Image (cartoon, rainbow, N blue to C red):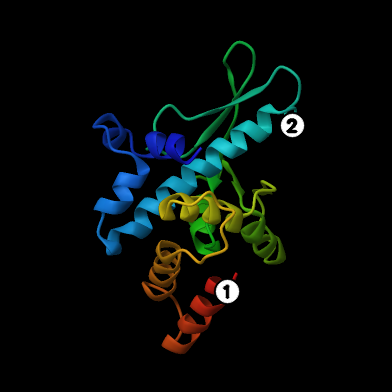
């Protein structure tokens, strides 16, 4: 699943023969967060399409990924049997409420489906146009980190790559004081 997500998120790298594992080994630490987030986002889209197509759409409708990894506006198309677009969705695998809010503002006619954690926060804020995928951001992150660390996910040894990703996302561009960012890192690393 991770390799497929990598190939779809980074078709140019995949076409040159690079794998997710080789990209993780090659990419400098400061760029690793972007790679992991790109793969996690595409994994979320793949998982969501599989979920929708597993009997979670009305009869005659099918979900499919957008033709391009850089498709503006939407990530998933819901089509009928004649391939007519019935609905377009944005899939946002993120911990950032503001990222989802920006997507809704930029494309107000396209609903956003997000991870369970962010959905719960958005609903508590009264945000409309958002659906819960039922998919956990933490589970997606764990899968990508396990692949980046070269384990199958059943190993309980903390991933140094995962901790580096958490540290980068907590401290780079984070809001609040250094102490608040440190607390956020500690909470996320413990999870």
Asked if the residues shown at circle 1 and circle 2 are in contact, with their CB atoms under 8 angstroms apart, the answer is no
**Which label sits on residue 50?**
none
Classed neighbour count for the residue bearing mark 2: other residues with Cα under 10 Å, few (<14), some (14–19), many (≥20): few
**Above/below status of 1 relative to 183:** above
**1 or 2: mark nearer the eye:** 1
- Quadrant where the C terminus sits is bottom right
The one nearer the camera, 49 or 70, is 49
Classed neighbour count for the residue bearing mark 1: other residues with Cα under 10 Å, few (<14), some (14–19), many (≥20): few
- Residue linked to disc 1: 190
- Residue linked to disc 2: 56
Q: In the rendered view, does 127 fall on the left or right side of 99?
A: right
The residue at 29%/63% (across/down) is: 29
**Residue 126, located in which quarter of the rendered image?**
bottom right
The one nearer the camera, 159 or 112, is 159
Q: Residue furthest top?
A: 82
- Name the element at disc 1: helix
Asked if one can make out residue 69 in the rendered structure from this viewpoint, the answer is no
- Name the element at disc 2: loop
**Above/below status of 38 relative to 72:** below
Residue 17 locus on image (x, y percent): 27, 32
Number of dots carrying numbers: 2
The residue at 48%/47% (across/down) is: 41
Question: What's the distance in space between the residues labelled 1 and 2, CA to CA?
Answer: 34 Å
Q: In the rendered view, does 65 fall on the left or right side of 161?
A: right
The residue at 54%/39% (across/down) is: 45
**Residue 63, located in which quarter of the rendered image?**
top right
Residue 146 locus on image (x, y percent): 49, 53
Residue 96 locus on image (x, y percent): 52, 63
């Amino acid at each position: 699943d991770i390799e497929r997500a990598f190939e779809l998120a980074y078709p140019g790298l995949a076409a040159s023969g690079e794998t997710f594992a080789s990209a993780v080994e090659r990419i400098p630490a400061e760029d690793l967060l972007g790679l992991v987030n790109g793969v996690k986002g595409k994994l979320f889209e793949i998982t969501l399409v599989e979920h929708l197509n597993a009997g979670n759409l009305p009869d005659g409708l099918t979900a499919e990924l957008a033709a391009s990894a850089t498709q503006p506006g939407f990530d998933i198309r819901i089509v009928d049997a004649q391939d007519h677009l019935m609905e377009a969705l944005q899939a946002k695998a993120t911990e950032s409420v503001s990222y989802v809010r920006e997507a809704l503002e930029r494309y107000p006619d396209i609903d956003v489906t997000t991870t369970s954690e962010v959905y719960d926060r958005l609903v508590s804020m009264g945000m409309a146009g958002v659906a819960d995928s039922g998919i956990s951001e933490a589970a997606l992150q764990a899968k990508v980190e396990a692949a980046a660390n070269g384990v199958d996910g059943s190993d309980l040894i903390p991933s140094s790559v995962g901790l580096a990703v958490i540290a980068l996302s907590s401290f780079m561009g984070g809001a609040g004081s250094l102490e608040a960012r440190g607390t956020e890192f500690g909470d996320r690393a413990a999870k």
